[in-house]
Amino acid sequence: MLFDQVNRELELAQRHLEVLKVVIERGPIGILKLAEETGMPTHKVRYSLRVLEQEQLIKPSSHGAIAGDSVKEFLSDFEKDIDELISRTEAVKETGQSL
């Protein structure tokens, strides 16, 4: 209950990352092929593509989605960002254990 929203956000982030990974590895790639490659419904792929495009992690081309201008920076910061999330999660765990 308390962590439901956090879990939903993590699931969504994981989905976006899966779509981004396929775009980086196999782009240009269209929605139908992305849905097939990821096993996700097209409406979820479409939403992830929209979010990734807003973040400039992908961009559209005439042949499908391709890696965007911010991918290199995102990837270089990824480890640091994940470590910060892990650190915050550990702090929450410690607080919960002290209840």
Image (cartoon, rainbow, N blue to C red):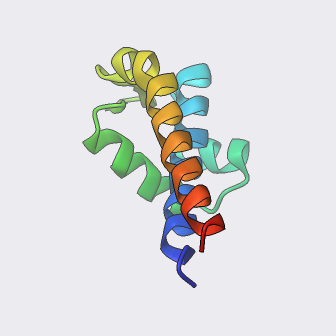
Q: Quadrant of residue 69?
A: top left
Residue lying furthest front: 98
Query: Would residue 82 be seen by someone viewing this image from the given angle?
Result: yes
**Total count of labels:** 0
Using residue 55 as the reference point, say whether residue 8 is left or right of it. right
39 is higher (above) or lower (below) than 71: below
Using residue 31 as the reference point, say whether residue 73 is left or right of it. left
Measuring from the top left, give residue 88's x and y in whole percent. 48, 47
Using residue 25 as the reference point, say whether residue 55 is left or right of it. left
Q: Quadrant of residue 21?
A: top right
- Taking depth in this image into account, of 40 and 33 the one nearest to the observer is 40
86 is higher (above) or lower (below) than 81: below
Residue at 59 percent of width and 48 percent of height: 90
Measuring from the top left, give residue 44's x and y in whole percent. 53, 61
Residue at 37 percent of width and 42 percent of height: 52
Query: Would residue 43 be seen by someone viewing this image from the given angle?
Result: no
Measuring from the top left, give residue 76's x and y in whole percent. 43, 15
- Taking depth in this image into account, of 64 and 59 the one nearest to the observer is 59
From the image, which quarter does the C terminus lie in?
bottom right
73 is higher (above) or lower (below) than 57: above
8 is higher (above) or lower (below) than 42: below
Residue at 52 percent of width and 51 percent of height: 91
From the image, which quarter does the N terminus lie in?
bottom right
